[in-house]
Image (cartoon, rainbow, N blue to C red):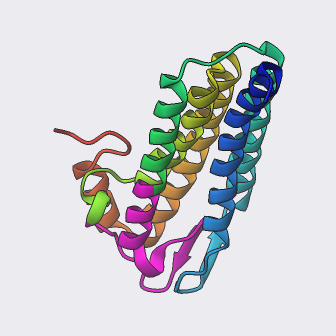
Amino acid sequence: MSSLDRIDLARWLLPAIVAGFCLARLIELRLRFRVQPGTVHAPWTLHLLTSIGVLTTVLCLAEYLYRGTAVPLHFPILGIALAVAAFALRHYSRKALAQFWSIHIEVRDGHAVVRHGPYRLIRHPIYVAAIIELLAIPVTLATWRAGAVGLVAYAIALGCRVRQEEKIMHDTVGAPWDDYCRETPAFFPRW
């Protein structure tokens, strides 16, 4: 193998790792979970977050390929660790939600506030996992410009979704949800 072949292989390894993150996420979304059917609210928020996530990934890949410079090894290692942490947190959170889990803002009969698992520390651990997962891509590729733009856009869109979800939970569950909101921070645990 010539040195040129090794350079080309190394150049495409990081995009392949990012593609692996995306493939793992698609497989995860295709898994079937026992959930109780419910009423979907504000489906546009899922479409917006998904679109921003895909666009951020594409922009990060484009920046990486355009830049054409090597990435120090510690960035891909940290990026992979972030992606693994995001998948683990999302899995743990989904298990805690059990039949109430959904990719949508979805209300079910007898909907209750979940206060165990990661939900005892924060109200939105799955959204924290999504941010960590999205952060893993620019860290892996060392694509700071595209990553920053994508993360800001994602945070704004996520803010819209959280407001929608929390209003619907307030309207559906009432006082138990309001108490939970007073006692439990949205994204960062109180230590």
- Indicate the quadrant where residue 112 lies: bottom left
Residue under the image location 68 percent in, 29 percent down: 150
Estimate the x, y position of residue 8 in percent, counting from the top left.
Answer: 80, 27
Q: How many marks overall?
A: 0
| In the image: residue 35, left or right of residue 67 | left
Query: In the picture, which quadrant includes the N terminus?
Result: top right
Estimate the x, y position of residue 59 in percent, counting from the top left.
Answer: 78, 29
Residue under the image location 55 percent in, 18 percent down: 72
Residue range highlighted in magenta: 88-116
Is 18 magenta? The answer is no
- Indicate the quadrant where residue 135 lies: top right
In the image as oriented, which residue stretches furthest toward the left? 191
| In the image: residue 36, left or right of residue 24 | left
Estimate the x, y position of residue 174 in percent, counting from the top left.
Answer: 37, 67
Observer-nearest residue: 187 or 176? 187
Q: Is residue 23 above or below residue 56?
A: below
Observer-nearest residue: 19 or 91? 19
Residue under the image location 32 percent in, 50 percent down: 122
Q: Is residue 11 above or below residue 28?
A: above
| In the image: residue 105, left or right of residue 81 | right
Query: In the picture, which quadrant includes the C terminus?
Result: top left
In the image as oriented, which residue stretches furthest toward the front? 1
Q: Is residue 114 above or below residue 14?
A: below
Q: Is residue 104 visible?
A: no
Observer-nearest residue: 77 or 90? 77
Estimate the x, y position of residue 103 in percent, counting from the top left.
Answer: 60, 65
Residue under the image location 32 percent in, 39 percent down: 188
Q: Is residue 106 visible?
A: yes
| In the image: residue 80, left or right of residue 52 | left
